[in-house]
Structure formats: structure tokens, C-alpha cells
Amino acid sequence: MSQQFIIHLGREVFLTAVMVASPMLIAGLIVGVSISVVQTATSIQEQTLTFIPKIIAVVVSLILFMPWMMNTLLDFSVELITNIPNYIK
């Protein structure tokens, strides 16, 4: 295994992790910013008000994107496992 291979494998792992986590992170970000704007407009300064809607948004996005996330992780895992003999050389 060369340094280029290790760098490429690390990049693939990182990009797969970012792709799988991004729908939940984006949903939480959108809900958090929306609630912050409403809090600012209404002068409500309750810190705990954003937690429940964020959790609900993350769970809903997890349910909606779970098939795609599982397929992405499964494809990556199958590719990684099937290429183990090539990695050992």
C-alpha cells in the first residue's frame, strides 16, 4: 500500500461520512436558523426552545433518507471488502 492509496481511501471514507450525515445536519441547521429568526423577531430568549424541533427534524430526515443512507454505506462497504485482496498486495 502506498501513501497515495491511503490518502485516497481516507478521502473516500471522509466523503462517504459527510454524504451520509449531511441530510440530518442540513435539516437541523434549517430548523435551528428558522427558530432563531422567530425568536429574534418575537424577542423570546428561551435557549431550550430549539432542541425539540431540531430533534424532530433530524429524526424525520433520518426516516426519509434511511434507504439512501443504507445503500450508500452498503455500496462503500462492499467495495471495501471485495478489494481487500488488492489492498494486501
Image (spheres, rainbow, N blue to C red):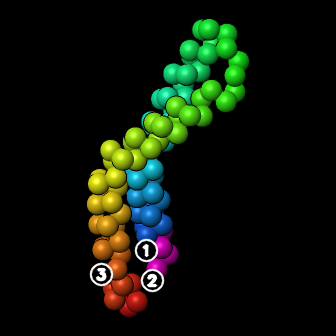
Residue 5 appears left or right of 71: right
> x, y percentage for residue 85?
34, 89
Mark 3 closeness class: few <14, some 14–19, many ≥20 residues within 10 Å: few
- Earlier sequence position, callout 3 versus callout 1: 1
Q: Quadrant of the C terminus?
A: bottom left
Secondary structure under the numbered disc 3 in the rendered image: helix
Q: Is residue 60 left or right of residue 40?
A: left
**Magenta part of the chain:** 1-7
Helix, strand or loop at label 1? It is helix
* Number of marks in picture: 3
The residue tagged 3 is 82
In-image side of 40 versus 81 (left or right): right
Q: Quadrant of the N terminus?
A: bottom left
Vertical order, 85 against 46 (above or below) = below
The residue at which mark 1 appears reads as: 5
x then y, percent, for residue 35: 55, 22
Identify which residue, 59 or 34, lies in the foreground.
Answer: 59
Residue matched to label 2:
1
